[in-house]
Amino acid sequence: MISINAKGRERLIWTAALLAPLVAVQVARFFEVETVRSAAAAGVVDTPAPAVRPVARPSAAQQRALDWLRERDFSKVIDPFASAVVARGPVNEIHIQPLAVAEPEPPAELREPIPTLELTGVMDGRRGPLASINRKIWRLGDEVVPGWTLEAVDARRKVVTVRSTLGNALELTVKNVPPTP
């Protein structure tokens, strides 16, 4: 006979508790399908007709757009994807110009130099969380470097947020340094 220790029994109970709802749903689905099949075979249940949605009439603006499209002759427009050969003559040609993608430069008041900050440690203190930045200990609200204040400290994740007076934020994390022998 197989004997299970207390930890194994606890794991078995938790696994059964997690799987019980899944098994119950699958059993219910099985019996539901069988019940519907047997009832349909006996002629008790009529299969419902699919619902048909009425076709919506186009609005006045949509109708004008459709009329405009019907009036145009698009037979002479060359398909730009059909081939690379360009037809000669009185044919409407489509010229596609690539879009210039340029990232806009931020306003001058939002551009500021990013300071060099190194987070070496984080801890919860009696009077609030502490962070070791550039080898100095700081509390929430302290100005770490000119214009940058310590805004948030998450000691569990070892993450610190430093915000500038212009609203820019930096998120610093503790580097995992191997211990020295």
Image (cartoon, rainbow, N blue to C red):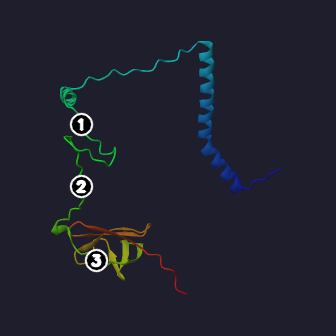
Which is in the foreground here, disc 3 or disc 1? 1
**Residue 157, x across and y down, in percent:** 44, 66
Which is in the foreground here, disc 1 or disc 2? 1
- What is the quadrant of residue 111 in the picture? bottom left
Which is in the foreground here, disc 3 or disc 2? 2
User: What residue is shown with label 3?
Assistant: 115
Residue at position x 63%, y 24% from top? Answer: 34
Q: Secondary structure at mark 1?
A: loop
Pointers 3 and 2 in contact (C-beta within 8 Å): no
Q: Earlier in the sequence, mark 3 or mark 1?
A: 1
Answer with left or right where residue 17 lies relative to residue 57: right
Task: Name the amino acid type tagged 3.
Answer: Pro
Which of 130/35 is in front?
35
Q: Secondary structure at mark 3?
A: loop
Distance between the alpha carbons at the discs numbered 3 and 2: 36 Å
**Residue 97, x across and y down, in percent:** 23, 53
Residue at position x 28%, y 67% from top? Answer: 169
Q: What numbered label is drawn on residue 76? A: 1
- What is the quadrant of residue 101 in the picture? bottom left
